[in-house]
Image: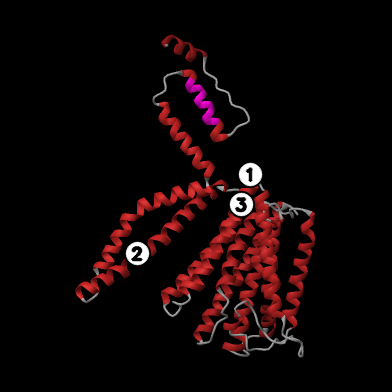
Amino acid sequence: MSIRTAVWLAWLVCALSLALTALSFLLIALILSLDAPIFFYWLEPTVVAVGYSVIGAIIASRLPNHPIGWICCAIGFTAAVEHFSGEYAVYALVAHPDSLAGGNVTLWMSNWVWIVMFGLIVFLLLLFPNGRLPSDRWRPFAWVSAAVSVVGAILAAIAPDSTPGPNSEANALRSLPNPFGIEGLPNLQQPVQVLVLSVGLVAAASLVLVRLRNARGIERQQIKWLIYASAMLSGALILKDTVFSPLGGTLWGLWVGYLLVAVGGLGGPIAIGIAMLRYRLYEIDALINRALVYGSLTAMLVGFYLVGIVVLQRFFVLLTGQQSTLAVVASTLLIAALFAPLRRRIQSFIDRRFYRRKYDARKTLEAFSSKLREETDLEALRGDLVGVVRETMQPAHVSVWLRPETASKDRQTT
């Protein structure tokens, strides 16, 4: 395939994915105008369709012979098809029955397309970042993953009931029968899908960690970006389900949870794009460091703030018999006073625990700079400089060269 053909094909797939996503939201607006429930599983496929289709098109147009870009394009397209088919089926079969043709076909597609998408995500993790498996020992697992995805999709396609998407319990289509299902078959596709996809994702994630342990240089930084994005998405899903899900009755709790999932979901394709195009690749260590520091700092400050409010309110109730806004003011001032020293302590702990070599190098340079101000012997200074370079940078060979006129001037001075 020529570069021109690859560019056109990649951006064509991206345009189709974005067009299907836009049509899906048009259907959502029509469904809401009829006071009918929408296809519940809409946020995640929207984020995946937009993020992976755009990043996939960029990577595939820049690196047409690399499989990662095309896999990203396929993931984005299948996510767009899943979202569109679900919303179309809801509108054609539930919100406004018999208004559009093809409702049964899109209902059938929404049952199994998402399984193909998950299978492609597993293959993305298997082949990232160089487009090859780590060794031939992983080839059987790759074939098993492909077979599991195909079997899971077939089971969902011929199952008697419709259970589209992982969140089928809250889905507007779950009560409808599968239009192309085979009656009399046991409805086992849902537990089988959850089991095999969970095992596949866990195994693929384990492979990423194995790659990280054996990788060096650029490949190691690329894998760090993927792990960082996965941690962001996992944290967003946990916060949405544990913190903001109980607040789902409030509008702000609902939208904060949606925002977290959107940001976490977009982090994956953005990280893959940075890793593959190698743009600001080596900034991942700084991002991880800042995430560890400010994540820990935020959690501790929130804890101190809540505990301070509770304790001070108890104190004011015992003292005056009623609550006081001074508890909030005092807790805020306490947090402001603790911010800078607590951040320094956490930064020092993170550097010592996770970035020991950089921490030791910085301490060595600080000690050398303080000694440099007091050193007057050129030979001693040269030896100290060589020692610092060996300790911090660990090169194979170190030599110091002075210009002849500088050396003669130093001898004349001494």
| Most distant residue in the front direction | 318
Alpha carbon separation for disc pair 3 and 1: 12 Å
Depth check: give the residue in front, 37 or 324. 324
For the N terminus, the quadrant is bottom right
Residue 320 location, quadrant: bottom left
| Mark in front: 3 vs 1 | 1
Sequence order check, earlier mark of 3 and 1: 1
- Which three-letter amino acid code belongs to the residue tagged 1? Gly
Badge 2, how many Cα within 10 Å: few under 14, some, many 20+?
A: many
Q: Residues within 10 Å of mark 3 (few under 14, many from 20)?
A: many
Amino acid tagged 2: Tyr
- Residue tagged by mark 3? 275
In the figure, is residue 359 to the left or right of 156? Answer: left
Q: Which disc, if any, is residue 217?
A: 1
Q: Is residue 369 magenta?
A: no
Residue that label 2 marks: 305
